[in-house]
Image (spheres, rainbow, N blue to C red):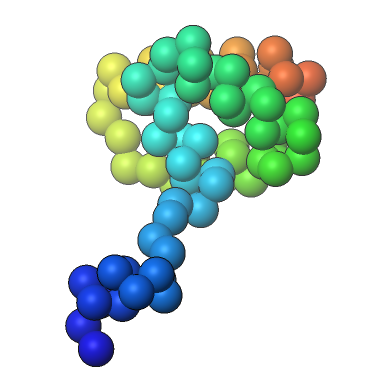
Amino acid sequence: MDIPSLIQLGRWVFCLEPHYMAVAKCFPARPKDRELIVALLQTGRLMAPVLNERWSSMALAGAWIVKSHRFLHETAALAGFPLPP
């Protein structure tokens, strides 16, 4: 069977690993993204060190590094999980 047929049958689920999803949310840096990441950190669905590791593994250019890094660190601190600089 091909993948579209399997999807229609409900046999496949495609999703991002939660920490990579959270890193992706650092780029638009919207208030709702911050709220989601804080909630996921506070409920143990994300681990701050793993989130920081995933962010560090991304190949980013100049302005994206500054904006997303600041958002990630502010959000982790707001959730009570400050990250090292």
Q: Viewed as shown, does residue 29 lie left or right of 51?
A: left
Quadrant assignment, res 12: bottom left
Q: Residue at x 39, y 70 (%)?
A: 10
- Of the 4 image quadrants, the one containing the C terminus is top right
For residue 4, above or below residue 43: below
Q: Viewed as shown, does residue 16 lie left or right of 36?
A: left
Q: Nearer the viewer, residue 82 or 24?
A: 24
Q: Residue at x 40, y 35 (%)?
A: 24
- Of the 4 image quadrants, the one containing the N terminus is bottom left
Image coordinates of residue 40 in percent, x first then y, are 66, 33
Q: Residue furthest bottom?
A: 1
Q: Residue at x 41, y 75 (%)?
A: 11
For residue 57, above or below residue 11: above
Q: Nearer the viewer, residue 15 or 9?
A: 9
Q: Nearer the viewer, residue 30 or 53?
A: 30
Q: Residue furthest front?
A: 9
Image coordinates of residue 64 in percent, x first then y, are 32, 23
Q: Viewed as shown, does residue 17 lie left or right of 44?
A: left
- Residue 2 at least partly seen: yes
For residue 18, above or below residue 61: below
For residue 8, above or below residue 31: below
Image coordinates of residue 43 in percent, x first then y, are 77, 34
| Tag count | 0
Q: Viewed as shown, does residue 67 lie left or right of 37?
A: left
Q: Residue at x 47, y 45 (%)?
A: 20
- Residue 66 at least partly seen: no
